[in-house]
Image (cartoon, helix red, strand yellow):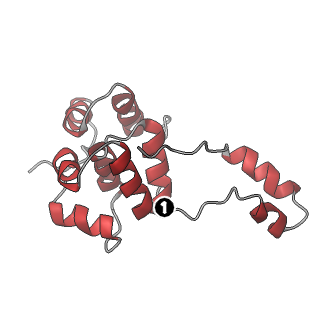
Amino acid sequence: MADIPEEHLTEELLDRLLASASIEQYLDEGLVSARTLTDYLFDRMEAHDLRRADVVRASGLNATVVYDIFSGQKPPRPRSRQLSLAFGLKCTLRETQRLLRLAGVSELWCKQRRDAIIIWCIRNGFDRIATDDELYRMGEATLLPAD
C-alpha cells in the first residue's frame, strides 16, 4: 500500500524559499513536488485497495468521466466533481485537500458553510451519498445535482 509522504507546512516551505540565497538552492532541497493529479489518483486507488469501477460507483460520477480523469484526458471540473472523486477514492480529509490542490482548485475551507459541512462529513466517515443528504438537509448545494 502506498503511503502519503510527510508533507511540510506551506508556511515552513515559504520561509525556506525566502531565506534561500538562490532559487536553485531551494529547489535542490527536493521539497518541490512534480506529482500530477493522475499519479495521485492512481496512488490513492492503490492505497485504498480500489478498482476504478469501485471509484465510479462510490463517487456517483459517470464512468466515462472517471476514466477520462484517470487518463488525464479531462480535467475534473467543476470542484464538486473533484470532491465526488475524493469520496469515491475514500480519501481522508488530508488526502482530499491534497487532491484539490493537485487539481488546481481551492481546498475545503472551514470558514465557508458548505465546505464546513463537507469537512465534517469526511471527518465523520460519511460517504458521498450521506454527504449529499447532509448538504441537502442543511440547505446547501449537493455534490451531484439531483436528477
Locate residue 134, reporting x and y percent: 24, 30
Residue for point 19% across, 48% down: 54
Locate residue 144, reporting x and y percent: 21, 49
Badge 1: few (under 14), some or many (20 or more) residues near its Cα, within 10 Å? some
From the viewer's perspective, is 33 left or right of 122?
right
Question: Which one is nearer the viewer's eye here, 15 or 89?
Answer: 89
The quarter of the image holding the N terminus is top left
Residue 79 showing in the rendered view: yes
From the viewer's perspective, is 59 left or right of 123?
left
Does dot 1 land on a helix, a strand or a loop?
loop
Question: Which one is nearer the viewer's eye here, 94 or 120?
Answer: 94
Please tell me whether residue 22 is drawn above or below residue 89 in the rendered image.
below
- Residue 95 figure quarter: top left
Residue 108 showing in the rendered view: no
Q: For mark 1, what is the residue?
A: 104
- Which residue is farthest top? 124
Residue for point 35% across, 68% down: 75
Locate residue 50, reporting x and y percent: 26, 47
Locate residue 97, reporting x and y percent: 47, 45
Looking at the rendered structure, the kind of residue marked 1 is Gly
Residue for point 26% across, 69% down: 68
